[in-house]
Amino acid sequence: MSDTSVHTLAVADPSVEIPPQPFPDVDSQGFWDATRRGELAICRCQRCRAWMHPPLERCRGCGGETAFEPIGGRGRIHSFIVMHRSSVPGLGPPPHVIALVEFDDTPGIRLTGMLVGVAPSDVEIGAPVQARIVDVPGGEFRAPEFVPVFGDGA
């Protein structure tokens, strides 16, 4: 059997102005409830106090119940990519910087999000950033994005 499929580059339709909306499930609902309140919250075991991302109803370490707890949202860029083509509708013209941020108050926990307020050529691994909660256009959701923290001395 021969493979006759055509491989194409995923590119967003520039006429679409609304990005995809989050689809919360039982594990992530607490995260979205927190962003609605303007907070960034991460899943934490109520028994052993371990932080977890992605979130789960039960701790993967001790089996304890989990809940979402607010965090400060300050962290450092662990990794990043620069998207030179639009692949997600509604994000505006590229380039887009997607950062993987490790938070200061939740060691080992990393979250991805848009990095705004800095040119892609100026982004550096280890640079300090702060999460802020912004509206997701086209719906009722809010989500974190990251902005650089200047004057950190790092």
Image (cartoon, rainbow, N blue to C red):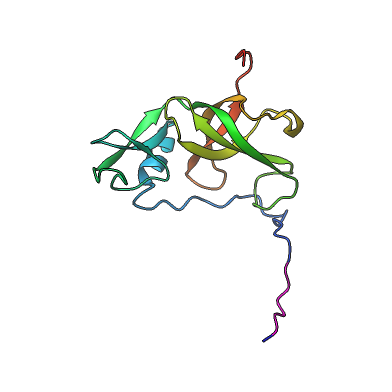
Count of numbered tags: 0
Please state the extent of the stretch shown in magenta in the rendering. 2-7
Residue drawn 43% across the image and 25% down it = 105
Left or right side of 119 for 105: left
Magenta portion: prevailing SS class = loop
Residue drawn 74% across the image and 50% down it = 85
Quadrant where the image shows the N terminus: bottom right
Quadrant of the rendered image containing residue 117: top right
Residue drawn 73% across the image and 28% down it = 122
Residue positioned most to the bottom: 1
Q: Which one is in front, 12 or 61?
A: 61
Q: Is residue 142 above or below residue 85?
A: above
Q: Which one is in front, 57 or 21?
A: 57
Q: Which one is in front, 53 or 26?
A: 53
Residue positioned most to the front: 61
Q: Position of residue 115 (x, y in %)?
A: 63, 34
Q: Is residue 65 magenta?
A: no
Q: Is residue 64 above or below residue 11?
A: above
Q: Position of residue 33 (x, y in %)?
A: 38, 40
Left or right side of 55 for 14: right
Q: Position of residue 8 (x, y in %)?
A: 73, 65
Q: Position of residue 140 (x, y in %)?
A: 47, 44
Q: Is residue 114 above or below residue 117?
A: below
Left or right side of 29 for 140: right
Residue drawn 48% across the image and 27% down it = 73
